[in-house]
Amino acid sequence: MEEKRYRQVQNFLKLQIQKGYYVVGDYLPSENELCSSFSITRTTARKALDELTKEGFIERQHGKGSIVRERRQSLGLLNVKGFSEAVGGDVKTIFLQKPQMNFWNPEIHFTVSESEIKEACIHFSRLRCVGEIPAMIEYNWLSGKILEGLIDLEFIDGSFFKTLSQHYRIEITGSEQELRAENANKNIAVLLKIPLGSPILHISLKFHTSKNNFYIYSELYCNTENYPIGNSYHI
Amino acid sequence: MEEKRYRQVQNFLKLQIQKGYYVVGDYLPSENELCSSFSITRTTARKALDELTKEGFIERQHGKGSIVRERRQSLGLLNVKGFSEAVGGDVKTIFLQKPQMNFWNPEIHFTVSESEIKEACIHFSRLRCVGEIPAMIEYNWLSGKILEGLIDLEFIDGSFFKTLSQHYRIEITGSEQELRAENANKNIAVLLKIPLGSPILHISLKFHTSKNNFYIYSELYCNTENYPIGNSYHI
DNA sequence: CATTTTTACTTGTACGTACAAGTAAAAATG
DNA sequence: CATTTTTACTTGTACGTACAAGTAAAAATG
């Protein structure tokens, strides 16, 4: 079956935004303009725009138009407050381990899906700092079959999710999380430069994606003393 | 202006669900049935059902119908895994402080809005246990002006949010959160029955509601050793 | 009687029309 | 020239029609 009309329009506009033809604050073409340029009816144009709204790319303004907005920062994933917001801030990411083939590590908290565990696994880990202060350690595991070529790839703007979206056209559609307060073990303490046994926030994540049976598994260890973890949600 | 047709239908169905005429797993009337019983077109019926989907009350199943689902547990609020899921489980809630007039406590992490800080404040706090194990302490502050009568009210099914929805017709529309791993102080340690200095998860919350300028401020202290905090999000 | 086909539903997509309601600039008014 | 009205857009709501596609039970088939 051919791709649905509204999804064609939706993806076209999404690509335009991702490529920067429209930037934050810009107005997309009006519903009627989309109608004539794509030879569709308003029902279909509206459906495409409504989907982009759901995905967080645009905001609809009654009487005005559809404005491009800051991509929903969180998607229910918890991100270090000040990490993304501190634009121009002194944020630094250090690879502890560049993407490479690996085992499905038993450290992964959520259960790896049946179809994935049989296949190759890519692992990478990063240390994220604010200024010179290490704030978070991040371990990631994902299917090496679906993200073929990732090992030889430079992340777009240093962002894995951006690479996922633009290079592989895979979007994050949700996540499961589990949070624990723990005492830092020796390894974590050394990397985060904190005393052994300091309270740290351990976040286990399983990201769901637009690709069937493809998940991303992450374990995060955060020093929340200076940079607490922030999250927000709005219907 | 009269209320929009789709919103009338949406609210009618929501009320039916809230009152228990439809329970989890039940199918709502089909789009065509709604059309004839409300004298509306499918466009309007679908809009009503789509809104209920967004709100998390139902799930649409192609070729089958609209099924009532477990109310989105989290709304971005993090809830103790096993607390709501452990249906029939040994969950116990103990009031440390029944709702009463109080000051806007400086313990509140988020900034209380201008219009609220001038008015009365209601405070209540609870200890939530799984079996005999205390898992979480919860401190709540909110406007006493808008929730008049709350002090003399028994919570519906012991749930504050249910009371808010059904008695005051106020819905949670979002939340801001900030998470920290901390060492338990003496007060917290005693209440949670853990050693002084144990790692605990401190969650600061500001709930947004459907009522203008009405927020709920909460500070949660969780022992995540046996019952980690779970959360999930799906587009 | 097991298997296949049909039927009668369901929701999903897409067409098209009409008017309400919000926005902002241009035009008319005093 | 300040104020009001009109105009020309925008999105929102709601009407109506047609067929695609998924589901599950009933009916037909061998």
Image (cartoon, coloured by chain):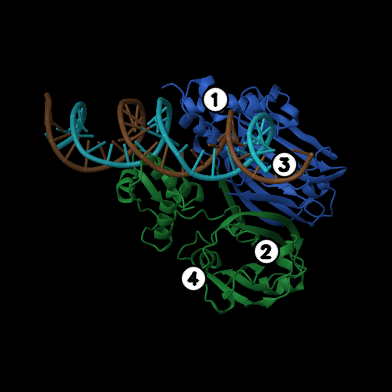
Chain colours: A blue, B green, C cyan, D brown
Pointer 2: what residue?
A: B217
Residue that appears at 37% across and 58% down: B22
Same chain shared by disc 3 and disc 1? yes
- Which secondary structure, mark 4? helix
Residue that appears at 66% across and 73% down: B123
Instruction: Tell me where residue A161 sits by quadrant.
Output: top right
Q: Position of residue A12 (x, y in %)?
A: 57, 24
Between A34 and B23, the residue placed more toward the observer is A34
Identity, as a three-letter code, of the amino acid under mark 2: Tyr
Question: Among all residues in the image, which is located at the extreme right?
Answer: A132
Q: Are marks 1 and 2 in contact (CB under 8 Å)?
A: no
**Mark 3: few/some/many CA within 10 Å (<14, 14-19, 20+):** some
Quadrant occupied by the N terminus of chain A:
top left
Pointer 3: what residue?
A: A138
Same chain shared by disc 1 and disc 2? no
Identity, as a three-letter code, of the amino acid under mark 1: Leu
Chain of the residue that carries numbered disc 4 in the rendered image: B
Q: Is residue B58 left or right of residue A24?
A: left
User: Real-space Cα distance between discs 3 and 1?
Assistant: 42 Å
Same chain shared by disc 4 and disc 3? no
Label 2 or label 4, whichever comes before in sequence order:
4
Regarding residue B167, the answer to whether it shows in the image is: yes
Between B213 and B2, the residue placed more toward the observer is B2
Q: Position of residue A230 (x, y in %)?
A: 71, 51
Q: Are marks 3 and 1 in contact (CB under 8 Å)?
A: no
Chain of the residue that carries numbered disc 3 in the rendered image: A
Pointer 1: what residue?
A: A34
Q: Position of residue A103 (x, y in %)?
A: 63, 34
Q: Is residue C16 above or below residue A232?
A: above
User: Real-space Cα distance between discs 2 and 4?
Assistant: 20 Å
Point out the frontmost of discs 3 and 1.
Answer: 1
